[in-house]
């Protein structure tokens, strides 16, 4: 390639194709941060964050907040994890990539933020809260080695916050069972959340209601989130949230009874043996590798 020709093109206002190889690559672990404008945390730094507005989807809210606070357009790569503070709030943590815009400067300061900047996590920075360090660490680890498939919200609405449970029981010989509801037709059970129960408690409540006699002899473990569904397009009718979670149930005491799932005391539910080999292997692969979206409870 003739460098003289390239120089001449630039002098004439023309452009050159940008290759994927860069002579000066951006820092690999820098994180986009914003300097707060709020009175209670003025001039402190935090990740771009904010509340959803009526009629927004989760992704729309994320994009709006990033644009308002940092000046950048972005698109999600995946949800990294979900956090909940009891019944008070749920936080969705995204790993995202920039698609346009420019870094917000102090000359553009407003009520949303004073400015944005890139942080290498080593330079001194006054943080609004250290809770974001765990989130940053999770996102960087995912970018280096993804541990679950891409899990972005699916645009499907419901009117309340619920959890659809893929609740499994494995016998010592490898037989896999699923708990199903049988009202009208077989279906995966759906547990409705309320103000006194967190997302991670939904499975415990369902097991307690369906197996009350053996509940305290069982280990109910919400292993993680397979995906979530939300649509804010019709406020009040579709702005609920559905978590699709994978749950395991185990006997805590050994004995002859451990080869079978615990007996059910609610006629609206039944245990179904997973006969489909491919499906059984997919479920077991998720369980053994832990390739699920984690949910962290701060309650």
Image: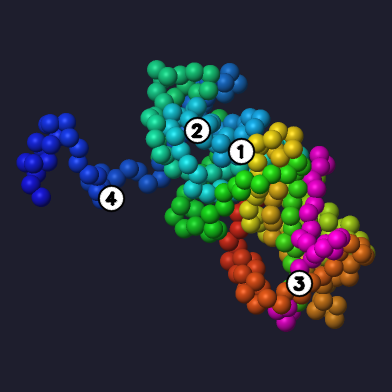
Q: Is residue 257 left or right of residue 169?
A: right
Q: Disc 2 versus disc 1: distance between alpha carbons?
A: 14 Å
Q: Residues within 10 Å of mark 3 (few under 14, many from 20)?
A: many
Query: Does the rendering let one see residue 229?
Result: yes
Q: Main secondary structure of the magenta part?
A: loop
Residue carrying label 4: 20
Pick whichever, 156 or 166, lies toward us.
Answer: 156
- Find the distance from the CA under tag 3 to the CA under tag 4: 49 Å
In 3D space, how far apart are the residues under numbered discs 1 and 4 (Cα atoms)? 33 Å
Task: Please tell me the numbered disc located at residue 274.
Answer: none
The local crowd at label 1, few if under 14, some if 14 to 19, many if 20 or more residues have their Cα within 10 Å, is many
Q: Of the numbered discs in the image, which one, if any, rests on residue 66?
A: 2
Q: Judge depth for marks 2 and 1 and give the one in front.
A: 1
Name the foreground residue: 30 vs 102: 102
Tell me which corner region of the image, top left, top right, bottom left or bottom right, holds residue 134: top right
Q: Compared with residue 135, is residue 247 higher up or lower down, i.e. above or below?
A: below
* Residue topped by disc 3: 177
Q: Quadrant of residue 265?
A: bottom right
Question: From what the image shows, is residue 224 above or below residue 231?
Answer: below
| Mark positioned earlier in the residue sequence (1 or 3) | 1
CA separation in Å, label 3 and label 2: 43 Å
Q: Position of residue 103 (x, y in %)?
A: 39, 29
SS for dot 2: helix
- In front here: 265 or 268? 268
Identify the residue at horizontal 44%, vertical 24% (top origin).
115
User: Magenta stretch?
Assistant: 172-196
Question: How many neighbours does mark 2 have within 10 angstroms: few (below 14), some (14-19), or many (20 or more)?
Answer: many
Q: Is residue 216 visible?
A: no
- What element does badge 4 sit on? loop
């Amino acid at each position: 390639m003739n460098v003289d020709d390239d120089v001449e093109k630039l002098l004439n206002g023309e452009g050159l194709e940008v290759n994927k190889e860069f002579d000066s690559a951006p820092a690999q672990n820098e994180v986009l941060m914003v300097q707060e404008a709020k009175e209670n945390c003025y001039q402190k730094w935090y990740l771009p964050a904010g509340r959803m507005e009526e009629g927004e989807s989760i992704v729309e809210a994320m994009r709006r907040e990033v644009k308002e606070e940092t000046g950048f357009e972005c698109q999600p790569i995946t949800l990294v994890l979900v956090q909940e503070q009891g019944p008070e709030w749920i936080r969705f943590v995204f790993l995202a990539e920039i698609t346009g815009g420019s870094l917000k400067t102090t000359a553009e300061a407003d009520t949303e933020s004073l400015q944005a900047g890139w942080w290498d996590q080593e330079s001194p920075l006054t943080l609004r809260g250290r809770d974001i360090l765990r989130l940053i660490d999770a996102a960087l680890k995912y970018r280096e080695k993804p541990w679950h498939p891409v899990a972005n919200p699916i645009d499907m609405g419901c009117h309340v916050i619920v959890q659809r449970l893929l609740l499994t029981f494995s016998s010592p010989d490898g037989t896999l069972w699923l708990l199903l509801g049988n009202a009208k037709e077989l279906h995966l059970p759906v547990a409705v959340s309320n103000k006194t129960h967190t997302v991670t408690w939904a499975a415990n409540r369902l097991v307690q209601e369906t197996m009350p006699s053996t509940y305290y002899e069982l280990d109910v473990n919400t292993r993680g989130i397979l995906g979530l569904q939300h649509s804010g397009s019709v406020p009040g009718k579709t702005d609920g949230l559905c978590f699709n979670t994978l749950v395991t149930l185990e006997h805590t005491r050994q004995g002859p009874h451990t080869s079978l799932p615990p007996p059910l005391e609610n006629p609206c539910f039944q245990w179904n043996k997973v006969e489909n080999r491919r499906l059984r292997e997919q479920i077991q692969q998720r369980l053994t590798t832990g390739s699920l979206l984690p949910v962290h409870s701060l309650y």
